[in-house]
Image: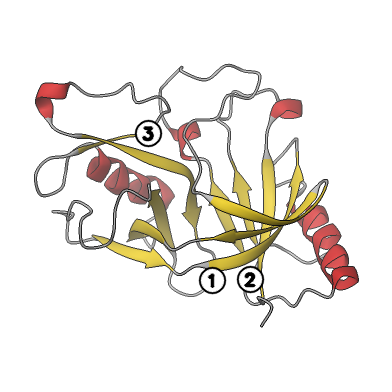
Amino acid sequence: MPPRAARTIVAFAGLLTVAACSVFGGQAAPEPKYTVVIAEDPFEVRDYGEMVVVKTTIADGSNPAFRRLFDYISGQNEGSRKIAMTAPVLTGDAAEGTKIAMTAPVLQSREGPREMIFILTDAFTAETAPVPTNPKVSLGAIPARRVAVVRYSGSMNGKAAFAEARLREWMGIKGLQPRGPAEVAGYNPPWTVPAYRRNEVMIPVATEK
């Protein structure tokens, strides 16, 4: 039985009523910066720097959690600062507050304390990001890490287990040691034609000493 991805990253654009992306694979936002260490299509090993995030529990369900985070980037924070969810920045009025770019994707944990997480751009630190006014929303950070990745198209969840099995087999060949649970990443809105969707399974791995 193929391993099941333990955590899921969900493309937030699919939950919005925006039409900035075409059905042929438009991506909703820029990605966090990373460095490619190994590239053997469809596999990669990447180094990500620390990522500043805003998060909330999903104990009451994904939709309420998403709404809390969406409210945060819509201005429910100290200073009422708006955080755009598309690239280029298209939302908000310059007179209504500072526009802040945000990266894709959104993270949703499936192990331990269940949380939904939005990743902010590297323009922010945990100290400079707008402070949430909702007590159920908080700022945090994902430490710098190295991840092994396999890319695939089609159904994000339907093919995740198979993609994870492929990735773990490739990691074994390369001698890469896992250092955390698998994640599934989706980068496109749901109206994107499946063949043009970009999905990935990611597994944190040990760095070389």
Image height check: is 23 above or below 62? above
Question: Which residue is drawn at the image coordinates 75% and 35% (left, top)?
Answer: 154
Among all residues in the image, which is located at the extreme right? 173
| Quadrant (top left, top right, bottom left, bottom right) of the N terminus | bottom right
Q: CA–CA distance between discs 3 and 2?
A: 27 Å
Circle 2 — which element?
A: loop
Cα distance in 3D space between marks 1 and 2: 9 Å
Between label 3 and label 1, give the one nearer the viewer.
Answer: 3
The quarter of the picture where the C terminus appears is: bottom right
For the residues bearing labels 1 and 2, Cβ distance under 8 angstroms = yes
Q: Which residue does the numbered mark 1 point to in the structure image?
A: 111
Residue designated by label 2:
181
- Tell me the tag on residue 101: none
Residue 1 visible at all: no
Dot 2 surroundings within 10 Å: few (below 14), some, or many (20 or more)? some
* The image quarter in which residue 8 lies: bottom right
Q: Position of residue 163 (x, y in %)?
A: 80, 53
Residue at 26% across / 41% down in the picture? 73
What is the secondary structure assignment of the residue under circle 3? Answer: loop
- Pinpoint residue 80: horizontal percent, then vertical percent: 12, 40
Under mark 1, the amino acid is: Glu
The residue under label 3 is 85
Residue 195 x, y percent position in the rendering: 76, 27
The one of 169 and 31 positioned closer to us in this rendering? 31
Q: Is residue 130 visible?
A: yes
